[in-house]
Amino acid sequence: PPPARATLPRTFAAMMAREGRVMRKNFVSTFTRVLVQPVMFVFVFAYVLPKLGGGAMAGGPGGPTFATILVPGLVGSSIIMQAMMAVIFPLMMELNWQKSITDRALAPVPIPLLAAQKIIAAAAQGLIGGLLVFPAVLLIHAEGQAPKVHVDNWPVLILVMVAGSLLSAAGGLLLGTLMNPQKVQVLFAMVLLPMTMLGCVYYPWSALEDIRWLQIVSLFNPLVYVSEGLRSALTPDVPHMPAWAFLLAILGGTILLTWASMRTFTKRVLT
């Protein structure tokens, strides 16, 4: 038979198959780490505090339980954090220590397509991380504090989860190409920690109305839009952003960050 010739689809599929093999090999350790923080937050806020007599109702008598507010926030946080981590640290190793990015650049595909492959692979890990958090936030709660989750709009839920994963993966690729690896601790202190604490994970965006300046500043946080999008789809009774607002931010941000990360990745690989 004639020898197989490399084509763009075949090469891209081979790269994705390699990512899938690595993901399967490290699945247990990677996603056990993903679950630790959400499980601890759910255990403390939805189980321990109600048992102690605090944090029972986040919206007053008859209002939503804190577990209800936590469900979309923690799922969104897991998607964002896992997708970013899945691309930032491997990319830093490939660019600075292992120098293995040179081998990838020799593949018969354009370098921007190599960047797209990294974004898609990291987004898949982020999506899986978000799906794995669902059982934890739904099952761990005190008696009478079960979250009330009702999927009000399946297309919006799927779109927010998929686009949110791509958004965070593209942002991770951009950070991984711009940051100095010797200052990676700054990533946690100045980016990831503020993003999580101010990303409307533990409260809806509308609750910040009394702190107007913070409500406006938080609009620069991509996690806000993912949390609010999931809140509108999973817990529609809890106040949330209008659909046009979070969809415009998520989709527009995904396009913008993908374009910017492809440019910086291409420049970094070629220099």
Image: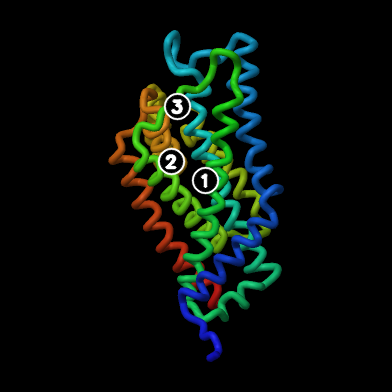
Is residue 39 placed above or below 155 in the rendered structure? above
Whole-percent x and y of residue 109?
A: 49, 78
Whole-percent x and y of residue 200?
A: 46, 32
Whole-percent x and y of residue 236?
A: 36, 27
**Amino acid type, residue under disc 1 in the picture:** Ile
Q: Any mark on residue 80, and which?
A: 1
Label 2 neighbour load within 10 Å: few <14, some 14-19, many 20+: many
**Amino acid type, residue under disc 3 in the picture:** Val
Are the two marked residues, 2 and 3, in contact with CB atoms closer than 8 angstroms? Answer: no
The residue closer to the viewer here, 229 or 145, is: 145
Q: Any mark on residue 226, and which?
A: 2
Are the two marked residues, 1 and 2, in contact with CB atoms closer than 8 angstroms? Answer: yes
Regarding mark 1 in the picture, which secondary structure is present there?
Answer: helix
Quarter of the image where one finds residue 134: top right
Q: Of discs 3 and 1, which sits in the foreground?
A: 3
Whole-percent x and y of residue 147?
A: 50, 22
Is residue 184 left or right of 221 when viewed as pictured?
right
